[in-house]
Image (spheres, rainbow, N blue to C red):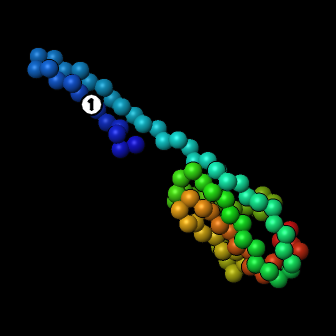
Amino acid sequence: KTDAGLYTCDIGTDVAKSKVSVQEKPTEVTKQLEDKTAAAGQDIDLSCELSKPDVTIRWYKDGKAIRKSQKYDLHQEGTRAILIIHDSTVKDS
């Protein structure tokens, strides 16, 4: 993206100009989430790998957004997005 800009070729008596735009590739999931089974009371960690680091991600359970709380820990380590479900119960299925 830093290569975008106006480029010119100056030959003294004439100038050729070109505007260059660079569009970034969209972020993709390179490693999917895996199904997990745990005993009640255990922490469960889910993670996926992304094609780019430090992108904005959102976690959902049954279509409802998950936010960081005592129950859920959300963080990213480079290209890895991680959700930790603390003290799991049957309702977390």
Q: Which residue occupies 48% across, 42% down? A: 24
Residue 66 can be seen, yes or no: no
Helix, strand or loop for disc 1:
strand
Depth check, front residue: 32 or 8: 32
Residue at horizontal 30 percent and vertical 26 percent from the top: 18
Question: Which amino acid is tagged 1?
Answer: Tyr
Extreme residue toward the right, this view: 90
Badge 1 crowding class, 10 Å Cα cut-off, few under 14, some 14 to 19, many 20 or more, is few
Quadrant (top left, top right, bottom left, bottom right) of the N terminus: top left
Q: Which residue is mark 1?
A: 7
- Is residue 86 found left or right of 80 in the rendered image? right
Relative placement, left or right, of 10 versus 6 is left
Picture layout, residue 11 above or below residue 26? above
**Which residue occupies 21% across, 24% down?**
9
Q: Is residue 86 visible?
A: yes
**Residue 47 point in image, percent of width and height:** 68, 63
Number of residue marks: 1
Residue 42 image offset from top left, x and y in percent: 80, 80
Q: 58 or 27, which lies in front? A: 27
Q: Is residue 46 above or below residue 55?
A: below
Residue 52 locus on image (x, y percent) = 53, 53
Q: Quadrant of residue 84?
A: bottom right
Q: Is residue 11 above or below residue 39?
A: above
Which quadrant of the rendered structure holds the C terminus?
A: bottom right
Q: Residue furthest left?
A: 12
Residue 53 drawn at (x, y percent): 52, 57
Residue at image coords 11%, 16%: 13
